[in-house]
Image (cartoon, helix red, strand yellow):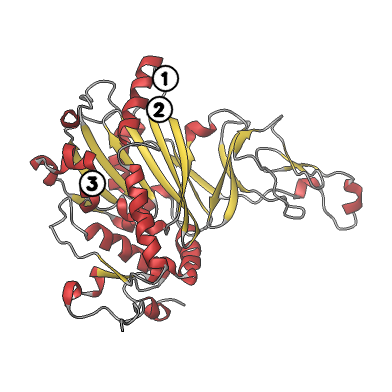
Amino acid sequence: MHEPVDAVTPMPSGGIARDLPPSHYLDNRIYTDPSVFARERERIFAATWKFVCHESEVAASGDYRLVAVAGRELIVLRGADGGLRCFVNACAHRGARLLRRPAGRLADDAITCFYHLWSYDSHGRCTAIPEAGGYAAAGIAAADVALQPVRLEALFGLVFVSLYREAEPLAEFLGPEIVGELRGPLGTAPLEVFHLHRAELAANWKLFVETNAEGYHELLHLLNRTTAVGLKEYRKRRWHLHRNGHLVFERAVIGYERLRLGRRDENLLPGMAADGHLVVDLFPDVMLNFRSTVLRIDSLTPIAPGRTLLECRGLGLHGDGDHVRRRRIAQHNQVWGPMGRNLPEDIWAVESQWRNMAAGASARSVIAREEDLGSMDDATLRAFYDQWQRRTGLAAHDADAGAAHGD
């Protein structure tokens, strides 16, 4: 009789896992355990800087977007004075949800609660309380009421928020090397979002992060096998590990013509070479993928241990003419987009992993490749989980050991 899969035994000493150090394998319960997920929300997503949108998505006064961070719904808006702000999407009176459409534009610079009609302006200040005299005895007046603000900072058009009031400034969180890497393609000329799509993944958020943080899985993609992996120059690419878990996959030239996709040597993004490629991963959940003429930004919103909202943005230069914009969109969709050559395959891969992990049929994951930070080195995953451990207080290789690291 076959023994059932044991999802909680220590890493076996034989076979593929023989003599692996703890840094080189993962306990798959870190993906499936609800208590781990709850800790991630509070100690990672509520405590760091979370990318929420690009400035071009809230370009005009009154434009707003609803975003979710660590389970809280927030309003990101452009005020009447042109400034960007963020507030919790809850009325200061009794907590009702204020805005319900995912995005839109405020009418007359006003946010009005549907429940008791308390109103606020784009600075978050309360501007009207109906029948206000009834609060006189309690000493409550509109001038003393405001929406709950949330820290917001923007860098090169990228908008981040943090629920943690004591979080270090965004530029310090990213570090000078990452800021310098982004300055060329993002900080030279204004960009704008021309494509946004969302997909809800039946998988844990970290599984998708992993697809953007290691090059070994590029063997999955016909596109990558044909245009990149087989090129000597590509295999010479190196990963660079930075403070706070951020990563850079250094620049390289991609052979798009090998798949008859044409050269990408016109309408280049600032700082990008013809047929060039650059990847910057920001802890915990963001990937910026530059391909000569277009930028893709992936970001994740964890909903539950096995549910993740993926948002994929395509960006080009602000002010593109119609012909140039159509060409950028076509080049974006050749590789990315909902039915591009890569994204569906990544989703199938991580949902396949999740299915077995959630059923208890896969107890551990191996992250043991060592290539001196070469393109297929798992050092990137080990760096991610080192940062994950520091912030959660849990042990990635043994979920039972977490209590010894946390408080």
| Residue 406 versus residue 179 in the image, above or below | below
Q: Identify the image quadrant of residue 71.
A: bottom right
Closer to us: 110 or 261: 261
- Dot 2: what SS? loop
The amino acid beneath tag 2 is: Pro
Mark 2 vs 1: CB contact within 8 A: yes
Kindly identify the residue that appears in the image at 49 percent across and 71 percent down: 35
Residue 214 on image: x %, y %: 25, 53
For mark 3, what is the residue?
249
Q: Mark 1 Cα within 10 Å, few/some/many (few <14, many 20+)?
A: few
Quadrant into which the N terminus falls: bottom left
Nearer to us of marks 2 and 3 is: 3
Q: Quick one: label 2 or label 3, which is nearer the N terminus?
A: 2
Q: Quick one: label 3 or label 1, which is nearer the N terminus?
A: 3
The amino acid beneath tag 3 is: Phe
For mark 1, what is the residue?
319
| Residue 320 versus residue 84 in the image, above or below | above
For mark 2, what is the residue?
190
Q: Is 114 left, or right, of 355 in this rendering?
A: right
- Dot 3: what SS? strand
Residue 88 on image: x %, y %: 62, 50
